[in-house]
């Protein structure tokens, strides 16, 4: 029974982190969606963001496994600190009045740069998770699924409502990652 509870707790943690990472893609996708996006573009952008939300944490996890072996017991505090810094950075930058950077969603290079930019946070989280050696496949597939779905939802909402939705998505995602950083440290 204890093993099943631990697995459920790990699954909930992975899903909450996937949602937190997907909030950045969601909120920026709303801005792109407000310009008007075709369904094909939504699928292409969502798919590419999903792929990057798998690849970036994988790269981060492998880096984290290596660093975890080097640091030993200190790894828990380092990974918690990374999540605190990442979450704090996401919260602080969400309050800056810069707005989303323009992206040409009709060109592959524009979509590629956008997908990469909203997936960079996944690398840092992957480093932290790599130090804990959790279920790698489940984690990255969940990150990819939620990243892709949340970006498509943001594009769809933005294209339907044409008003500023999701401004605080990055703030909420950063606060969640910050909270996980505190949990890892304490």
Image (spheres, rainbow, N blue to C red):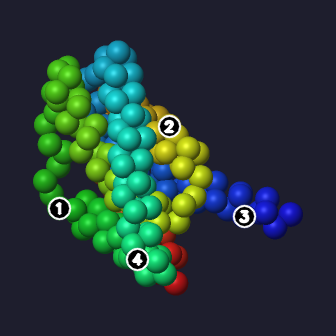
Residue 71 is labelled as 4
- Few, some or many C-alpha atoms within 10 Å of disc 1 (few <14, some 14-19, many ≥20)? few
- Few, some or many C-alpha atoms within 10 Å of disc 3 (few <14, some 14-19, many ≥20)? few
Q: How many marks?
A: 4
| Comparing labels 1 and 3, the label whose residue is closer to the camera | 3
Spatial separation of the CA atoms under disc 2 and disc 1: 28 Å
Q: Are marks 4 and 3 in contact (CB under 8 Å)?
A: no
Task: Residue under label 2, please give it.
Answer: 145
- N-term-proximal mark, 4 vs 1: 4
- N-term-proximal mark, 2 vs 1: 1
- N-term-proximal mark, 1 vs 3: 3
Please, which residue is most extreme toward the bottom here?
186
| Comparing labels 2 and 3, the label whose residue is closer to the camera | 3
Q: Residue at x 72, y 64 (%)?
A: 6
Element carrying mark 3: helix
| Comparing labels 4 and 1, the label whose residue is closer to the camera | 4
């Amino acid at each position: 029974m204890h093993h099943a509870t631990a697995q459920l707790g790990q699954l909930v943690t992975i899903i909450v982190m996937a949602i937190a990472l997907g909030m950045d893609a969601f909120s920026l996708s709303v801005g792109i969606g407000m310009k008007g996006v075709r369904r094909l573009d939504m699928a292409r952008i969502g798919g590419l963001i999903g792929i990057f939300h798998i690849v970036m944490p994988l790269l981060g996890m492998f880096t984290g496994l290596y660093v975890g072996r080097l640091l030993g017991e200190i790894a828990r505090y380092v990974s918690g600190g990374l999540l605190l810094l990442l979450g704090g950075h996401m919260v602080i930058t969400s309050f800056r009045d810069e707005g989303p950077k323009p992206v040409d969603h009709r060109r592959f290079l524009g979509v590629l740069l956008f997908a990469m930019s909203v997936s960079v946070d996944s690398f840092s989280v992957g480093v932290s998770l790599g130090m804990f050696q959790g279920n790698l496949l489940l984690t990255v597939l969940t990150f990819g699924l939620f990243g892709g779905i949340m970006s498509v939802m943001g594009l769809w909402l933005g294209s339907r409502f044409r008003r500023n939705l999701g401004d605080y998505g990055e703030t909420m995602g950063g606060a969640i990652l910050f909270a996980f950083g505190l949990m890892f440290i304490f």
